[in-house]
Image (spheres, rainbow, N blue to C red):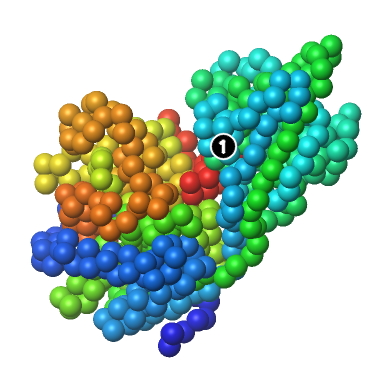
Amino acid sequence: MNFRTSILGSGVLMLSSGLTGSAIAATSADTTDLRDAVTVEAVRAHQAAFQGFANANDGTREASSPGYLASVAYVAEQMQAAGYNVTVQPFNYPFFEELTPAILEQIAPTPTAYAYFGEPGFATMSYSGSGDVTGVAQGVDLILPPDPVANTSTSGCEASDFAVFIPGNIAIIQRGSCSFAQKAANAKAAGAVGVVIFNEGQPGRDVNFLGTLGGPDFDIPIVGASFAVGVELAAAYEDEEADDVTVRLAVDATSETRTSANVIADSTLGRDDRVVVVGAHLDSVSEGPGIQDNGSGSAAILEIALQMAALEIEPRNMVRFAWWGAEESGLLGSEFYVRQLSKRDIKNIAVNLNFDMIGSPNFVRFVYDGDGDATGTAGPNGSANTEKVFLDYFAQQSLPVEATAFDGRSDYGPFIEVGIPAGGLFTGAEGIKTDQEVTVYGGVAGEQYDPCYHLACDTFDNISLVALDQMSDAAAHAVLTFALTTSAVNGTAKANPNATVASAKSMIYRGSRLLK
């Protein structure tokens, strides 16, 4: 690829305070021409290209795969040909992939095979080490029954929790107030040959779950499990007269460091102290081609960028289009990008617009809840104004929307952690559509918004053309509105005073994986 591979350093300044979101929403910019130019057919053509790259490369566009690198080259070439200043930004990231289904079974006193990815059952923690071990299950500082309301368990959070732990045993640890990685590290240091971290037990925290350890730092098998499984395995811990519970735990996985890349493309015009960062992740999970997740958002912002160039739009504020790598591994491409920014660079970014999954087959039109009035979690100052741009647009189109929270599940996460206003669109992933949502949006109640989420069937055919059309238009409207505005994103409008401001501490997800 004939592109610069230098790390992006400076480039961007924040809008000065003073004007409110209503001034942004009332901008004189007419976005009709751009919205008309961004057609579903053109967005679908980019998705077809992504599908072709996956088809030629084992059906995946995972962030280090040949299918992903072909996607990077395609986007970079398209943007360079359109006249943007393009940078391919490489970075190393922790890779994890299970090679065969994991095994968790009770050998004695009651032989039981627990359901892999079932309920009640267990799931492998990402970045677990490999191994096939058998040992006595030993509970670690458990709270059984759990506090009925608060998440109070500190099981495994302190090295002292393992004071009586017997090396060679398998640690049975309760989910709670610290990270899974911290619990696992303490268990490993105490001599555990394997770790089961089971859900804490309150309503909503009792089922099997997907967790992440954050990186390939472990050489023992580590899984998460439902509350019911954990209680069974910890039976001897709770009843000293009970027989020891012997457990077999086996994980077969690759956990290592690999290389991926972001694609960054800047407009040649516009103030570099008012940069609008428009992002979507380009990678898929290993299991499939990711044409909806997130070929939909990636294709849409690519077509928006190309049509802005074709229409010879001259932005007042620099627009930086970004395609992030390794989102599926925990927002790692966007995190790397933000980590390279200086304090001045961070101040230079006016707003981050994020488009991750905008064509879900069983869709709902979700808008990120910038002021926190619906979800209780607000974005940084200015996010309320960003939300208002989307809400005003959909109101003008007579299209109802729902709020979705800043919970850390997409690439806005690293931006809001450093105080950059954010907003964006989403049409749903593994969440279940309600009867009420069907009344508003159509579709099928009781099924996932995207039935092929993170599966091999997330192909070119896994799409709602209605959602893709509506959300692409809304994205184009917002991008051009912020590109042309002379008012401040962060402004004087305040978020809901009762809402928690989203931050690294308040977010429990890193991409699709739970941290604690």
Q: Residue at x 76, y 24 (%)?
A: 108
Q: Quadrant of the C terminus?
A: top right
Residue 468 position in % (x across, y down): 22, 53
Question: 144 or 61: nearer the eye?
Answer: 61
Which SS class for mark 1?
strand
Depicted 307 relative to depicted 497: above or below: below
* Amino acid type assigned to the residue bearing label 1 in the image: Tyr
Name the residue nearer the viewer: 438 or 339: 438
The residue shown at (38%, 33%) is 375
Give the quarter of the image for residue 34: bottom left
Pinpoint residue 411: horizontal percent, then vertical percent: 44, 55
Asked if one can make out residue 474 in the rendered structure from this viewpoint, the answer is no
Q: Compare residues 259 and 280 and report the one nearer the observer.
A: 259
Report which quarter residue 105 is drawn in: top right
Question: At 82% across and 17% down in the image, what residue appears?
Answer: 243
Badge 1 is on which residue? 116
Residue 376 showing in the rendered view: yes
- The residue at the far bottom in this view is 2
Is 358 left or right of 111, judged from the image as shown? left
Q: Quadrant of the N terminus?
A: bottom left
Q: Callout 1: few (<14), some (14-19), or many (20+) C-alpha neighbours within 10 Å?
A: some
Q: Position of residue 215 (x, y in %)?
A: 65, 55
- Image location of residue 500, percent across then percent down: 47, 36
Which residue lies at the image location 78% right of the left edge and 37% below the top edge?
A: 134
